[in-house]
Image (cartoon, rainbow, N blue to C red):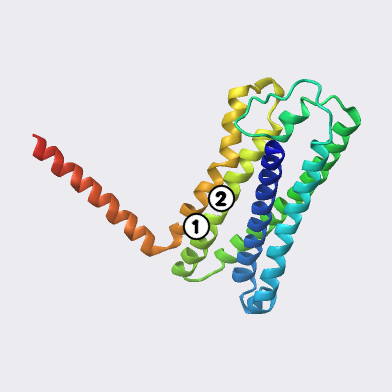
């Protein structure tokens, strides 16, 4: 039950996060490319509906994968070389050919959905950067870029680590590499989200700068006091 809960929560939060990142990309696209229609296209009701759809789709994906995976009989023990339960490693322990193919089919459907979201993000940012380059003032371009770059950084980190973890060649696969990649895409992006998005906040940047200056000054004083 604990392993099933881990699989469900991992898939649920990863899928929901990526769908929410897609919605945030649409928000930036409308704000920069169609600013006069922002209130119409992205009102409070529309935002609530899109967020609910993201969470509901993530929940459905997680439920289907978890139910199918843990209905498969395991004939190679139940020991995983990971710090948490992950679908590919659980499927390696299965001895049901039909169930394995069914799970592969579910993974392909999910991959197509995720790939569609990724194509939408790429297309949206192409349009966003075209619109930003047409902004006449340098201050306006800088403000538009600073709004998009934190989101683009999170998407790039999330997608690159997850894709490499699942699509890397079997020849370079090893337990230690699989463990490191699992940490990268499941722990690092969510941990960096608050930090990356807060880089736009001038007050937070000023506070961090003052803290670093204070720590550096304190270290210098201690150095001279000790000498």
Measuring from the top left, give residue 18's x and y in whole percent. Answer: 66, 52
The mark found on residue 154 in the picture is: 2
Measuring from the top left, give residue 214's x and y in whole percent. Answer: 23, 51
The mark found on residue 160 in the picture is: none
Quarter of the picture containing the C terminus is top left
Picture layout, residue 79 above or below residue 147: above
CA–CA distance in space, label 1 to label 2: 9 Å
- Identified at 70% across, 72% down, the residue is 46
Measuring from the top left, give residue 31's x and y in whole percent. Answer: 60, 70
Measuring from the top left, give residue 10's x and y in whole percent. Answer: 66, 44
Q: Residue furthest front?
A: 1
Picture layout, residue 144 above or below residue 208: below
Picture layout, residue 77 above or below residue 217: above
Front-most of residues 168 and 46: 46
Front-most of residues 226 and 147: 226
Is residue 150 in view from this perspective? yes
The residue labelled by disc 1 is: 197
Task: Left or right? Give the position of 220 relative to 201.
Answer: left
- Identified at 74% across, 49% down, the residue is 114
Instruction: Tell me whether the residue at label 1 lies in contact with that at label 2, contact meaning CB atoms closer than 8 angstroms.
Output: yes
Is residue 126 in view from this perspective? no
Picture layout, residue 63 above or below residue 223: below
Q: Residue furthest right?
A: 98
Secondary element at image label 2: helix
């Amino acid at each position: 039950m604990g392993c099933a809960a881990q699989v469900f929560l991992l898939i649920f939060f990863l899928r929901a996060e990526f769908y929410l990142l897609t919605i945030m990309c649409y928000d930036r696209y409308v704000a920069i490319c169609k600013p006069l229609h922002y209130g119409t296209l992205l009102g409070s009701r529309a935002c609530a509906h899109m967020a609910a759809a993201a969470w509901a789709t993530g929940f459905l994906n997680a439920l289907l994968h978890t139910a199918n995976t843990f209905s498969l009989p395991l004939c190679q023990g139940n020991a995983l070389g990971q710090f948490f339960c992950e679908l590919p490693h659980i499927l390696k322990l299965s001895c049901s050919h039909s169930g394995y193919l069914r799970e592969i089919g579910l993974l392909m459907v999910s991959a197509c959905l995720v790939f569609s979201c990724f194509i939408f993000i790429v297309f949206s940012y192409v349009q966003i950067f075209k619109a930003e380059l047409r902004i006449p003032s340098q201050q306006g371009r800088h403000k538009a870029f600073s709004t998009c770059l934190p989101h683009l950084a999170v998407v790039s980190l999330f997608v690159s680590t997850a894709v490499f973890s699942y699509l890397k060649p079997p020849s370079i696969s090893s337990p230690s590499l699989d463990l490191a990649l699992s940490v990268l895409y499941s722990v690092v992006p969510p941990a960096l989200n608050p930090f990356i998005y807060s880089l736009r906040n001038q007050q937070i940047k000023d506070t961090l700068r003052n803290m670093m200056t204070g720590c550096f000054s304190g270290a210098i004083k201690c150095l001279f006091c000790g000498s």
